[in-house]
Image: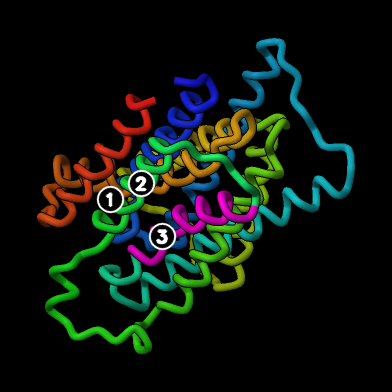
Amino acid sequence: MHHELFIAILAGLGGMLGWGLADLFAKKTIDEIGDVVSLAWGHIFGTIILALVAVYQFGSGHSISIPHDTQTWFYLLLFGIVQATIYLLVYQGFGKGQVAILNPVFASFSGITALLSILIFGEIVSGFVLLGLITLFIGIILISADFQALKARNYSFSHVKGLREVVLATILAAFWTLLWDKFINGHDWISYALFMYLFMTVVILIVAKMRNINLVVTKKHTWKYLILIGVCETIAYLAISLGYSTTFHLSVVAILSGAFSLPTIILARTFLKEKTTQVQLSGSLVIILGIIILAVLQ
């Protein structure tokens, strides 16, 4: 396997596990303290952990790249604002409508990103890589959709509550991923991820303040999950930023990291005793098959 492709696969898996575990721990907090409070505190801890990683990097003899031009700072701020907007739109959409139909819509952002990268930026994808990516994307859609819930209701897409927010979030996520790859490539991925994440956290806190949301958390057992959300978010953003910065396999990193529902579903079934549908089980197996195709058939 080519060295760059190997790094891209590891980066994508890091994003998948990081975001998947963050979603799992969020399940433990959202019902108790609300989605925006969980989002705010998770990102506060994520920012602290990213800062500690940067300090460790500096202490290990590596320099920390601090942008000196206004344009770079502007783009880092813009990336942070857009990413915060994506989170808030998804939570808002899921709060309004049925996750059964909205989740697969948002999950499609990774496939849109890969398609745009191949068609617009001319990313070269070999036969087995393309086969693995298509297999992964099919698995992502299968694992994200709750077909049993869809069969139980007569849905009309034109009347789905929350669809507008989730579609907008999906489009923003696809272009954010595509442009973050181009922006960060060849730069210090740790410091850029830190500054972008910091701006994203500040935006979330500002929105919480504007909505008069009380961020006080009184239940002590909740703090460990909020810290774990921050840890896992940090892993995800560092992983994908590494992949985007050091490789040209945007589609591999994007689609693999977009399969974050796989660890969430598997671990939620194991530790939270949540039920898994046959379609979700099939989707899990398809995703695993896609990973094998990427990792072995090269």
Between residues 131 and 218, which one lies in front from this camera angle?
Answer: 131
Applied colour scheme? rainbow
Q: Residues within 10 Å of mark 2 (few under 14, many from 20)?
A: many
Dot 3 or dot 1: first in sequence order is 3
Spatial CA distance of label 3 from label 2 is 10 Å
**Farthest residue toward the top?**
61
Question: Is 21 drawn above or below residue 169 in the view shown?
Answer: above
Q: Residues within 10 Å of mark 1 (few under 14, many from 20)?
A: many
Amino acid type, callout 3: Ser
- Marks 1 and 2: in contact by CB < 8 Å? yes
Q: Which residue is mark 3?
A: 108
Q: Which residue is mark 1?
A: 139
Q: Residue, x 63% and y 39% (percent of image)?
A: 193
Amino acid type, callout 2: Ala
Amino acid type, callout 1: Gly
Q: Which residue is mark 2?
A: 259
